[in-house]
Image (tube, rainbow, N blue to C red):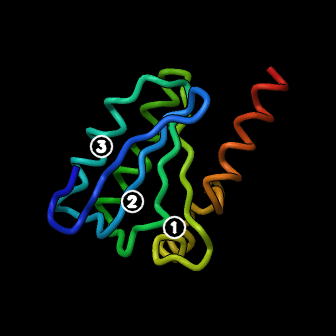
Amino acid sequence: MTDGDLTISHDADDGVEIIRLEGDVDLTNADLVREAVDATTAERVVLDLSGVTFLDSTAITTLHDGQQRLASEQRALVVVSPPETPSAWTLRVTGMDGAVCESLDEALVAELARRARA
C-alpha cells in the first residue's frame, strides 16, 4: 500500500508477521500504520522502520499504542530501527529505543530464542 510519502508492505516469516514501512510517518498517515498493525493476527508482529525517513509525535504515539494494544492481547509488537536511520534517532530521543531491535534478522532470531524457551 502506498499513501503519498509512505509505503506499507506485509510479509511473514515462520509465523511472525512483518510490516515494512518506507518513507515519512506523520499525522497524515499514522492511521494507516495503526490499521496495518490492527489487521495482524500473529502472536509476534515486527514493525520494520529501516526505510523510514521521518517520524513525528503522532507516529511515536501510534507505535506506543500499537505495542500496548498487542500486549493487552498477549501478543508483541517488535520495532526494528537500525542505529544509523532517522527513525532510530527519533526513538532514542523519545526514550523508546530500549524495546527496539537494530535489524530484522535480530528481531527474528530473538523470536526463535523466545520460542525455544517457551
Q: Earlier in the sequence, mark 3 or mark 1?
A: 3
In the rendered image of this protein, does residue 86 appear above or below residue 36? below
Disc 2 versus disc 1: distance between alpha carbons? 8 Å
Amino acid on which the number 3 mark rests in the picture = Arg
Q: Earlier in the sequence, mark 2 or mark 1?
A: 2
Residue under label 1: 91
Which of the image's four quarters has the C terminus?
A: top right
Q: Residue at x 22, y 49 (%)?
A: 1
Q: Which mark is residue 34?
A: 3
Element under label 3?
Answer: helix
Element under label 1?
Answer: helix
Disc 3 versus disc 1: distance between alpha carbons? 17 Å
Residue under label 2: 60
55 left or right of 113 in image: left
Q: Earlier in the sequence, mark 2 or mark 3?
A: 3
Disc 2 versus disc 3: distance between alpha carbons? 11 Å
Element under label 2?
Answer: helix
Residue 27: x and y in percent read: 20, 62
Amino acid on which the number 1 mark rests in the picture = Leu
